Image (cartoon, rainbow, N blue to C red):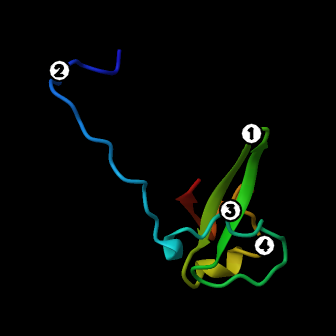
Amino acid sequence: MVWTIVGSCTGTIAPTGAPTFNQADLIGCPDEWVKSTSYEEDDLVAVTVSTTPLRKIAFKCKAWPFSGFCGEFGPADFGGDQGWTKEGG
């Protein structure tokens, strides 16, 4: 079991408002990595890890001199850790 009961609630809780999002924070997935593309420091790419359901992982190109590996090795390729840092799903 991963949960521990620490107590119970009494009374009523009023509903909260609808969630709000800052549109600037919702960038979605970046474009897929393409071999031989010229990537620079902080460029973002995605790698598809499954199509059903669709799941992608985002990676960021490391700073120079490692950024030189970003167009040569994909984030999921052997050697990809030389140029890419995993950012998240």
Q: Quadrant of the N terminus?
A: top left
Amino acid tagged 3: Gly
Q: Nearer the viewer, residue 18 or 63?
A: 18
* N-term mark: 2 or 3: 2
**In percent of the image, x 46 and y 65: which residue is there?**
21
Amino acid tagged 2: Ser
**In percent of the image, x 56 and y 75: which residue is there?**
62
Q: How far apart are marks 1 and 2 (CA)?
A: 36 Å
Give SS at disc 2.
loop
* N-term mark: 1 or 4: 1
* N-term mark: 3 or 4: 4
Q: Which picture quadrant has residue 83? A: bottom right
Give x and y (percent) for residue 22.
46, 71
Q: Distance between the residues labelled 1 and 4?
A: 28 Å
Comparing labels 2 and 4, the label whose residue is closer to the camera: 2
Q: Mark 2 points at which residue?
A: 8
Amino acid tagged 4: Glu
* N-term mark: 2 or 4: 2
Neighbours of disc 1 within 10 Å: few (<14), some (14-19), many (20+): few
Q: Which picture quadrant has residue 88? A: bottom right
**Contact between labelled residues 1 and 3, with CB atoms less than 8 Å apart:** no
Q: Is residue 3 above or below residue 62?
A: above
Give x and y (percent) for residue 46.
70, 62
Residue 53, disc: 1
Residue 80, disc: 3
Comparing labels 2 and 3, the label whose residue is closer to the camera: 2
Give SS at disc 4.
loop
Give SS at disc 1.
loop
